[in-house]
Image: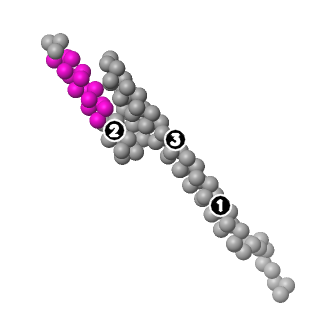
Amino acid sequence: MYLKFYLKLGESLQMWLKEFKIALIEKDIDRLTKLMESLPELTEATEIDEALHLLKAATILVESLRDDTKSSMIQMKKNMDFLKSTQAPIMGKLDITS
């Protein structure tokens, strides 16, 4: 009975590690978040080390996506400012003096 429990625990840890790796490759932040919330109990040094490396990679990914989003927002602001500057001024009243 204990062997079955240990094997299931080991299998679930391996599944978690595989799912985490897939989510990293796919850059799926939602799935990474869910997996981080359901982090299994790590008992062996190799498991802890692998999980730490994966979590570090996830941190780097999130920071990279955050920086990309920030750059995109800055570029969109510049584009909007440019488009506003090229528009003709809007006259509020009908100008019939010409």
Residue 83: x and y, percent?
A: 65, 68
In this rendering, is residue 78 above or below 36? below
Q: Residue at x 85, y 85 (%)?
A: 97
The amino acid beneath tag 3 is Glu
The amino acid beneath tag 1 is Lys
Q: Cα distance, mark 3 to mark 1? A: 23 Å
Question: Which class describes the residues within 10 Å of circle 3: few (<14), some (14-19), or many (20+)?
Answer: few
* Left or right: where 26 falls relative to 60: left
Q: Nearer the viewer, residue 39 or 85?
A: 39
Say whether marks 3 and 2 touch (CB < 8 Å).
no
Q: Which residue is mark 1?
A: 78
Q: Cα distance, mark 3 to mark 2? A: 17 Å
* Left or right: where 30 falls relative to 5: right
Question: Which class describes the residues within 10 Å of circle 2: few (<14), some (14-19), or many (20+)?
Answer: some
* Left or right: where 93 falls relative to 38: right
Q: Is residue 2 magenta?
A: no
| Element assignment for label 3 | helix
